[in-house]
Image: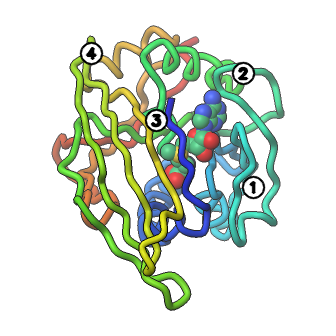
Amino acid sequence: MWRTQIPKSIYARFFVSWSRVRREVLVLRDILLKFNARKVIEFGCGIGRHGYLLSKLGFDVLLTDIRDWRFGSARRMPFKIYDVLEGGNIGVFDAGYAMGLIIVFNYEQIIRALHNIGELLGKGIFIFDYNFTIYNEPREKIVRIRGREYRAIMMKEEIEPIEGGVLYKYRIDILDDKGNLVGVEDTEYSVYDKETIFKAIEEAGLKIEEIHWAKWDPIKYKYRLSKKEADSAFIAVRKTV
Ligand SMILES: C[S@@+](CC[C@H](N)C(=O)[O-])C[C@H]1O[C@@H](n2cnc3c(N)ncnc32)[C@H](O)[C@@H]1O
């Protein structure tokens, strides 16, 4: 199961830039508006930037995650602990979304999570992103935080075939400008192909309402929307009746 031991201020700068979040939020906004959704729940919100920007756009957002690691302005947002693998009722919403969440689960967990979310949202739409392939990740990335330079170094990368996709294992070390180790992400997650994800959606009792294709840029660390089928997608699903 995916986990990180990188301090959230550093994690935010490396992996959740405002420019990445803004791009994803615009896709979410368009789909939510199309389905007339105002009151929405975010699952696996992490540091909470998506929900924060959506609330600035006028949506009524409840952030949720299995742990509270909101950072910065998102700390002022409504938040509840919620485990999508456990499910259960925590309110009534027009729609829900999750970025970078479904990718952390294996096949059985994806079905369970999607099923639980479907039960919670009823007729409401659920939007999530998924990367169907492994990327050529940069070996090293540098960012400046409050005048100091930090380096993220890919220390290990392994790919194992599994049914319907691959298991991706990696370790990223974060070093400060004095060479001290300040954070580690040593983890793994499954990456399934498109057919397998579509099958999981169906098995969970949901159907696809919309797909927006996107290309992931591992250097800029953000999506670029694509008119044709591409390596990633924003998928809007809804419970079948
Ligand atoms: C890769 S991070 C993505 C965070 C954020 N949504 C983003 O896009 O930057 C995955 C998030 O899912 C959360 N998570 C993991 N398992 C979960 C579960 N069973 N239910 C809800 N959230 C979960 C983690 O705590 C983490 O915040």
Instruction: Give me the C-alpha separation between circle 2 and circle 3.
Output: 19 Å
Q: Earlier in the sequence, mark 1 or mark 4?
A: 1
Q: Nearer the viewer, mark 1 or mark 4?
A: 4
Q: Are marks 1 and 2 in contact (CB under 8 Å)?
A: no
Q: Earlier in the sequence, mark 1 or mark 2?
A: 1
In the rendered structure, which amino acid carries the disc numbered 4?
A: Ile
Q: Residue at x 75, y 55 (%)?
A: 60
Task: Answer whether residue 116 is visible to the viewer in this image.
Answer: yes
* Disc 2 secondary structure class: loop
Q: Are marks 1 and 4 in contact (CB under 8 Å)?
A: no
* Disc 4 secondary structure class: strand
Q: Residue at x 27, y 34 (%)?
A: 132
Task: Answer whether residue 124 is visible to the viewer in this image.
Answer: no
Q: Nearer the viewer, mark 4 or mark 2?
A: 4
Q: Nearer the viewer, mark 4 or mark 3?
A: 4
Label 2, residues with CA under 10 Å away: few <14, some 14-19, many ≥20:
some
In the rendered structure, which amino acid carries the disc numbered 2?
A: Gly
In the picture, measured across the screen, residue 94 lies left or right of residue 35, that is right
Give the number of the disc on residue 60. 1
